[in-house]
Amino acid sequence: MPIMNATNPAELSLCHMDIDMERPQLMFTVARALASEVRISILRLLCERNMNVNEIAVALGIPTSTAALNVRVLQEAGLINTRMQPGVRGAMKLCSCRVEALTMSLFPAGR
């Protein structure tokens, strides 16, 4: 499994995300994204298959707006990928898992 030491979550592909204290903003963003039962549930769903925001909302029994907000948080943290694709009415956001494992070190790199 490749290890990615990216400072920008947008640089990540399906990998092991390795975060340390030298990137505190990334650590904060990822920790915040994981600090929600709804977002953990979304990650579980996306580990099984790609889903659009509406499918996520239905699967979790939450409003689409709530699903969209939580998808955005996960995307900003670099934990999922999203892409727009044609839908029945306009475009829809297709979501997929981006990171299969995560390590957070509370020590600076190299210690």
Image: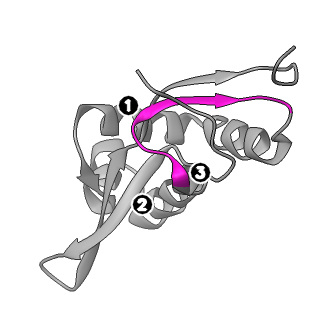
Residue at the location (72% across, 47% down)? 29
Q: Which comes sooner in the sequence, label 2 or label 3?
A: 3
Q: Which comes sooner in the sequence, label 1 or label 2?
A: 1
Dot 1 falls on a residue whose secondary structure is helix
User: In the image, residue 28 lies at what x, y percent?
Assistant: 78, 42
Q: Which comes sooner in the sequence, label 3 or label 1?
A: 3
Q: For mark 1, does the 10 Å Cα neighbourhood hold few (<14), some (14 to 19), or many (20 or more) residues?
A: few
Which amino acid type is shown beneath numbered disc 2? Pro
Mark 3 vs mark 1, foreground winner is: 3
Seen in the picture, residue 71 relative to 104 is either above or below; the reply is below
Dot 3 falls on a residue whose secondary structure is helix
Q: For mark 2, does the 10 Å Cα neighbourhood hold few (<14), some (14 to 19), or many (20 or more) residues?
A: few
The residue lying toward the viewer, choosing from 4 and 100, is 4
Residue tagged 1: 44
Q: Is 93 a magenta residue?
A: no
Magenta stretch, residue numbers? 11-21
Residue tagged 3: 9
Circles 3 and 1, Cβ within 8 Å, touching? The answer is no
